Amino acid sequence: MKIGINASFLRKPGTGIGQVTKNVLQTLISHPQYLTHIDEFVLYCEEEPELDFSLPENFHIRVFLPSWKRDDTLRKILWERRVAFLAKKDGCDAFLSLYQDSTVFPKSGSIRHTMVVHDIIPKIFPEYRDNTRQALYWRRVERGILSADHIIAISEHTKNDLVSELHIAQEKISVVPLDVNPQFRNPISLERISAVFKKYDLTPGYIYHGGGLEIRKNAGMLLRAYARMIKNPLISLETKMPILVISGKIFDTKNKLATDVVGLIQALQLQKDVKLLGFVPDEDLPALYSGSLFFVYPSLYEGFGLPVLEALCMHTPVLSSDTSSLHEVGGQAVLYTNPKDIDAMSHQMKRLISDEALRKTLISQGAVQTLQFSWEKTVQKISALITE
């Protein structure tokens, strides 16, 4: 049996899908018991990947680009269309897309297509398809999702969205949760934490928010709730207020999909209370989680919510939205809030700041909650589904 895999995101290891692609492949390789009846794998890529692990002899990389080589939406559409042709030409029996894409295989063909769907954000938030190319790509992705022989949803919430929004039969969907990068499962040394603190000029005990500054991540509401909390004289007198540290690429103010955190901080007069780190490489994140008093993630919508699981793995208390898939990830180990209610969010932050016993309880429960997730469980389920 020959399996083709869309491994395009190996060229973007810093993205969520890039991490999933790498971890699925590494786990697959290190657990040969999952490879029963599979003779060969073909990894389809847009660039020669720089891997920090070795591929077995039965794993082959096929790099190709369409005639349009600029890295944009058009290239993505053309590449995902051509990969179906090449997989058929290469004699693949099954194909695995590790993200929702526009690849469509002919119904008359013999290739069974399994697609991992992380979310359907452009369907839920129309602003993510408000230009011609975005709208065109999403229409093609919808067609790709609908044409797949089987779908792997990364959460029950994503499955429910697929059923309600795209009217896909429930029996066509399997739920397979993800896990975090291994670095979040390994102990971090005090020396490493100290080095990261020095790099960003930090001291322990701050409130941390990371995971991106798209509008759906809700950093704007977080800033408003934080401002309300620290400017409340009663609260300020009772408790010393920690600073708010925010990581994530700062986008141009013309980007409608991003929060203008710089402008909002100025408008709320929080220049002395909020520290923006900008883009932070993955290797620095464990230390940032570890040094925080708690992590806050008020996202309006998530297909899964990896940052919440990352924080739990680093023994950090978490305040999260009570929306979408975040309850599936956090369980009883997370304190929740209404992401659209400034007073509720401010109140929950104040609780975590002042209640040490609550923080310790959440850390203890988090250690149990994280045991539900592992790449071994993820890959075992995926392997079973693509070899059915």
Image (tube, rainbow, N blue to C red):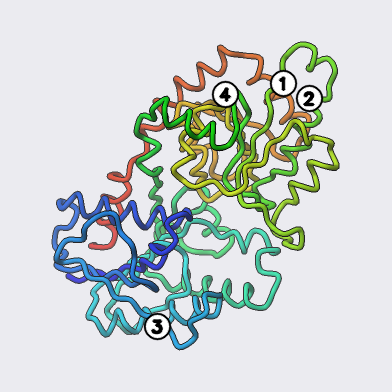
Mark sitting earlier along the chain (3/2): 3
In the image, 330 versus 288, the foreground residue is 288
* Residue of label 1: 241
Q: Residues within 10 Å of mark 2 (few under 14, many from 20)?
A: many
Q: Position of residue 207 (x, y in %)?
A: 63, 29
Rendered image quadrant of residue 324:
top right
2 and 1 marks in contact (CB < 8 Å): yes
* Label 3 to label 4: alpha-carbon separation: 50 Å
Cα distance, mark 1 to mark 4?
13 Å
> How would you rate the neighbour count of disc 3 (Cα within 10 Å): few for under 14, some for 14-19, many for 20 or more?
some
Q: Are marks 4 and 2 in contact (CB under 8 Å)?
A: no
Q: Amino acid at mark 4?
A: Pro
- The kind of residue tagged 2 is Ile
Image-based side of 269 in relation to 182, left or right: right
Q: Which residue is mark 3?
A: 82
Give the Cα separation between the discs numbered 3 and 2: 55 Å
Of the image marks 4 and 2, the number of the one nearer the N terminus: 4
**Which element type, helix, strand or loop, lies under badge 1?**
loop
Pair 4/2: label in front: 4
Up-down relation of residue 256 to residue 374 (above or below): below
Q: Secondary structure at mark 2?
A: helix
* Residue type at tag 3: Arg
What amino acid is at disc 1? Met
| Residue 230 numbered tag | 2
Which labelled disc corresponds to residue 204? 4
Q: How many other residues sit within 10 Å of disc 4, few (<14), some (14-19) or many (≥20)?
A: some
Residue drawn at (47%, 53%) of the image: 16
Chain-order first, disc 1 or disc 3: 3
Q: Nearer the viewer, mark 1 or mark 4?
A: 4
Residues at circles 1 and 3 in contact by the CB criterion of under 8 Å:
no
